[in-house]
């Protein structure tokens, strides 16, 4: 399932934050199945503690978020709810992120998930967005559920939405695992194994290095499991010896004769290096450098480094943002440029600052800073595209832009397509790219022309996407 930040509704490989009074929330979805319920969707939300307001109303220091959720198919609303979520009680000034889990029964098919969030104690803090959802039929044949990674889990006999098969699971809503992440706790479910002829079967996992599609030695494991209607699997994978890189965990369900019945994957990024980049207690602030950072914009400019930072660096930026310590934020900004461009850190910073202000002016909207938007992030990360083709109106397609880069590092002719399905707010989202590490969406052409195109199927999402008059996005995407 897709993972997004509600700040920008971009897919998961980048952590994105905003400044000021804006609520910051991360969201993920996973699909499971229960015999007496059917196929159902789990919706996970993580509310960033420093972005919400806490108030004492006689029951301790708490935050409140108004949640409105609506799930629709192509013709009608199939689920809706609206309620106030109250955070756990905060201890003095210590406030942790808090979570919400929803479960919604859905029949197989394609849906649109719409969520609106509002901090009850803040004015002008509402954020909203839409996410396409595809529900697979887990009731037929042998299947493996989505892979749910836990931030932490422990045995539990409670029956809350956080509990599954005897475990209380707090979901991990990031696919980045730094040096301090020693293990990967994974939960998944197996369906339809009662149809296997033998009384037992095999479940294995392996880790694949995405750089060269090779299996990483020492991380493959196979277990024998007895069949049942639903078989829960909870295991912990040790990551201590896994080096830095981009990986995929592949699960296989096979018969005892090695016949593959089902597979499922989970992609993640690992950093296994001691990163002391921002342990800069002795860094002396340069008055000239610091004069370029207004005091009311320190956190804003620190956040603006996220699009060009490595995952390990992003983690340190987030920790500094949570502390709200402006002196540490100033050190962080100056330290970043001192280490990345030691010969001319001040000049490099001023150049980047100008780019941040440029994307703020061009791509910012009423609920996102410019660097939080997909176009702003791509612009800051990869620079000015060599070709930009915009279509603000089309008889058959949503407004879209296609950016082409002749060269990004060692890669040539890389393209990005952004679209605006909401038709308002200048809120273009990344729909598809052929750049390594960016969102790849095989159904992008169908989604772009969704207003007059029937959905395809899982194997061929574009089967009904016939040529439309005025619909030239395919030609434009491939012509450069």
Image (spheres, grey):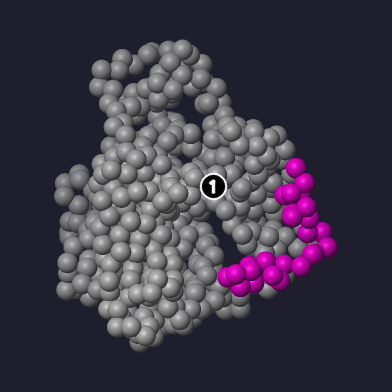
Is residue 475 shown in magenta? yes
Could you say which is closer to the camera, residue 179 or residue 453? 179
Q: Is residue 156 in view from this perspective?
A: yes
Task: Determine crowd level at label 1: few under 14, some 14-19, many 20+ residues with C-alpha closer than 10 A.
Answer: some
Q: Is residue 6 in view from this perspective?
A: no
Apparent side of residue 470 relative to residue 356 in the rendered image (left or right): right
Q: Is residue 70 above or below residue 322?
A: below
Could you say which is closer to the camera, residue 112 or residue 253? 253
Instruction: Measuring from the top left, give residue 260's x and y in whole percent.
Output: 44, 71
Is residue 70 shown in magenta? no
Q: Is residue 106 above or below residue 338?
A: below
Apparent side of residue 218 relative to residue 377 in the rendered image (left or right): left
Magenta span: chief secondary structure: loop
Q: Which residue is mark 1?
A: 438
Disc 1 element = loop
Q: Residue at x 78, y 59 (%)?
A: 471
């Amino acid at each position: 399932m897709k993972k997004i930040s509600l700040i920008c509704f971009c897919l998961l490989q980048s952590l994105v934050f905003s400044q000021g009074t804006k609520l910051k929330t991360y969201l993920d979805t996973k699909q499971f199945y229960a015999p007496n319920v059917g196929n159902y969707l789990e919706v996970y939300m993580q509310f960033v503690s420093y972005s919400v307001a806490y108030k004492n109303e006689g029951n301790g220091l708490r935050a409140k978020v108004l949640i409105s959720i609506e799930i629709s198919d192509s013709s009608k609303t199939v689920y809706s709810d609206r309620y106030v979520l109250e955070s756990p009680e905060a201890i003095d000034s210590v406030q942790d992120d808090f979570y919400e889990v929803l479960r919604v029964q859905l029949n197989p098919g394609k849906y649109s998930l719409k969520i609106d969030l509002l901090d009850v104690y803040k004015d002008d803090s509402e954020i909203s967005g839409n996410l396409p959802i595809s529900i697979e039929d887990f009731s037929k044949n042998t299947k493996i559920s989505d892979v749910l990674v836990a931030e932490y889990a422990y045995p539990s006999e409670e029956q809350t939405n956080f509990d599954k098969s005897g475990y209380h699971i707090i979901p991990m809503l990031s696919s980045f695992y730094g040096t301090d992440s020693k293990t990967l706790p994974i939960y998944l479910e197996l369906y339809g194994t009662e149809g296997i002829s033998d009384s037992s079967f095999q479940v294995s996992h392996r880790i694949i290095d995405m750089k060269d599609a090779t299996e990483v030695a020492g991380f493959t494991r196979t277990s024998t499991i007895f069949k049942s209607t639903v078989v829960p699997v909870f295991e912990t994978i040790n990551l201590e010896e896994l080096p830095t890189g981009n990986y995929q965990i592949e699960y296989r369900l096979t018969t005892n004769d090695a016949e593959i019945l089902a597979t499922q994957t989970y992609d993640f990024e690992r950093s296994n290096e001691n990163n002391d980049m921002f342990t800069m207690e002795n860094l002396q602030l340069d008055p000239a450098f610091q004069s370029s950072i207004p005091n009311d914009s320190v956190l804003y400019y620190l956040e603006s480094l996220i699009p060009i930072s490595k995952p390990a660096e992003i983690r340190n930026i987030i920790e500094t943002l949570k502390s709200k310590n402006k002196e540490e934020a100033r050190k962080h900004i100056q330290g970043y440029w001192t280490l990345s461009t030691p010969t001319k850190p001040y000049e490099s910073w001023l150049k980047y600052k100008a780019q941040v202000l440029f994307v703020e002016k061009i791509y910012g909207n009423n609920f996102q800073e410019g660097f939080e938007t997909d176009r702003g992030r791509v612009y800051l990360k990869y620079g000015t595209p060599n070709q930009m083709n915009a279509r603000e109106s089309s008889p058959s397609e949503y407004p879209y832009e296609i950016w082409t880069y002749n060269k990004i590092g060692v890669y040539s002719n890389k393209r990005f397509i952004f679209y605006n399905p909401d038709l308002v707010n200048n809120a273009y989202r990344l729909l598809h790219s052929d750049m390594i590490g960016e969102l790849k969406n095989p159904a992008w052409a169908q989604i772009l022309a969704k207003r007059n195109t029937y959905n395809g199927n899982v194997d061929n999402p574009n089967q009904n996407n016939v040529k439309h008059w005025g619909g030239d996005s395919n030609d434009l995407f491939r012509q450069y």
